[in-house]
Image (cartoon, rainbow, N blue to C red):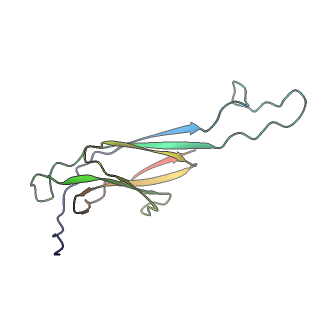
Amino acid sequence: MAKSPRKKFRLSLCVSLVAMAMVAGCGGGNSLGEASAPVDGTPAAAPAPSTGSISLAWVAPQTNADGSTLTDLAGFRIYYGTASGSYSQVITISSPIATRYTIENLPPSTYYMVLKAFDTNNNESQASAELSKTIN
């Protein structure tokens, strides 16, 4: 079986980034966010570790790089990691109509990410501009 020729398509994505720090757990503190010791003098439990999430939103490409109409968009891939230009994690979104995704339960760090579209032959677009977000 002959392999289909690779075609390039333009990833006209306007990617926006919203990061939200979520505290995994609640309680054990006062209104100032300070841990309070129990009345009996035993030490207070350690606070629950915090995690965060990053929400991405984009506009799907409509054309191939040659200007022709894109008719076989299959989905998107989010590449992310904790070093600029080095993406150790990949999330595949197998829906051509998806325009948003939230990466959840991320431990504190600075994350770098790019988005690529792919077609039914698994050809990927060029990456979007790299985005970064720090989760404290």
Q: Is residue 83 left or right of residue 37?
A: left
Compared with 124, 96 (above or below) is: above
Furthest-right residue in this view: 40
Residue 75 rendering spot, x and y as whole percentages: 28, 52
Residue 111 rendering spot, x and y as whole percentages: 48, 52
Q: Which residue is at a point 18% across and 68% down the rendered structure image?
A: 6
In the rendered view of the protein, which quadrant contains the N terminus?
bottom left
Compared with 35, 129 (above or below) is: below
The image quarter containing residue 126 is bottom left
Residue 119 rendering spot, x and y as whole percentages: 22, 57
Residue 35 rendering spot, x and y as whole percentages: 75, 33
In the rendered view of the protein, which quadrant contains the C terminus?
top right
The image quarter containing residue 2 is bottom left
Please name whichever residue, 124 or 83, is drawn nearer the observer in this view of the structure. 124
Q: Is residue 119 left or right of residue 79?
A: left
Q: Which residue is at a point 30% across and 43% down the rendered structure image?
A: 98
Compared with 78, 16 (above or below) is: above
